[in-house]
Image: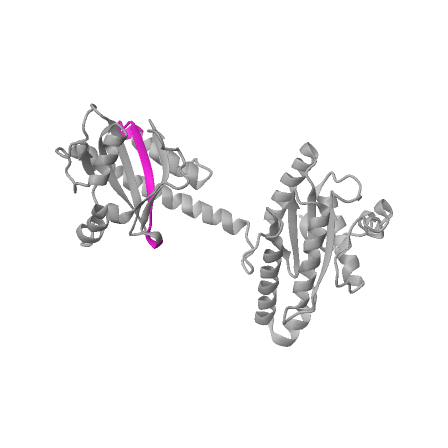
Amino acid sequence: MAAAHTPRESVRAAAEGVRAALGGSFAAISAWERELGQLKVLVNVGELAEGEEEFPGDEAYPVHEFPEIVGFLHEQWAGGGQPNAWVETVDGTAGDGPYNHQRVAALRRRGRGCCVVAPIVLHGRAWGEVYVARTAGGRVFTRADADFATVLAAVTAAGIAQTERLAEARRLAFTDALTGLANRRAVDMRLDEALERHRRDGAVVSLVVCDLNGLKRVNDSCGHAVGDRLLERFGSVLSLCGAILPGALAARLGGDEFCLLTVGPSADEVAKVAGELCDRAAELELGEGVAVGVASTGDPIGPVRSARRLFRLADAAQYRAKGAGSRVPVVAGRDGGTDDPVIRLADAPERASSTERRRFRR
């Protein structure tokens, strides 16, 4: 589990490890979704029966069909300690836990002879269960197997907790704390991947750079808490507009600068959304609108071989929009093609944009 890169890989590793340790033919890990009152199967491993999938999208069971879960965890475990696993058999004679008709029927339907069920407890609460089965005619699980399953469920819980901590750390590393948008690091990584796809199959890559007008005035006259509120509100507007473009990444680059990164939508689609962004920003109660620059490989801007060039073009377009007090986006390459003043500005060797100074200073 520790070597897994995603939560999905982690629970699969746990299920496979528990199955092998208990000598089962099949294993599953399910999570208890309290708000929906159901057990949702996250992964199935081993010998899958008809209709079972390794990563099912919608395999879930109402908890009321498994009263032993609620009863066991809330009544027997309420006094403290670790909930123990239990065994159920296809004929209901060798089990040492609460008999459940649904589980027994499932065993018969899928050609299995017995199962052991171990609750997973995380942060002091029931999180889900480990389920391991053996084929019909095989050796039946014993009390010792159930005790071992209890230990394995505890190990699984520790692995899930670590996976959640790592996932949260990764999320924080790529998220702007104030707005909840992606941060510059996330943009850097996504843009490198996007340009690789552009070089490989010609996908259109577009970058919309935004400079929020009037933030300093708001900070000076109303305080930084109000300025932060303006940043948050604009972040929401940016996210809303970005949602119009499939797969768009909305990000705060730092200070009062934001961006949208898209892969796939046409340059015209991106420019249209950038225009809507300008309109919505102008309607915000605070601030003075936004200056927006757009650079897209779908426009005549010349070859884009690096993230740096696309950033320079978008930032130069934004710089021109801000200088002109434009209420609409400035799009690189649409005023004379490669003779566009924006492109000449971006290619001027003496000019390093504010975005670049933050992005490339090491």
Is residue 239 in sight in this rendering?
Answer: yes
Left or right placement of residue 268 versus residue 144 in this view: right
How many numbered discs? Answer: 0
Residue 162, x across and y down, in percent: 39, 44
Where residue 153 sits, quadrant-wise, is top left
Q: Residue at x 80, y 43 (%)?
A: 300
Residue 296, x across and y down, in percent: 73, 46
Q: Residue at x 70, y 35 (%)?
A: 202
Residue 39, x across and y down, in percent: 32, 45
Above or below 93: residue 253: below
Would you say residue 26 sits in the magenta stretch?
Answer: yes
Is residue 150 in sight in this rendering?
Answer: no
Left or right placement of residue 328 versus residue 120 in this view: right
Towards the viewer: 323 or 331: 331
Above or below 108: residue 36: below
Where residue 258 sits, quadrant-wise, is bottom right
Where residue 137 sits, quadrant-wise, is top left
Towards the viewer: 108 or 187: 108
Would you say residue 241 sits in the magenta stretch?
Answer: no
- Quadrant location of the N terminus? top left
Residue segment shown in magenta: 20-35
Q: Residue at x 60, y 47 (%)?
A: 246
**Colour convention:** one colour
Residue 293, x across and y down, in percent: 74, 55
Above or below 116: residue 348: below
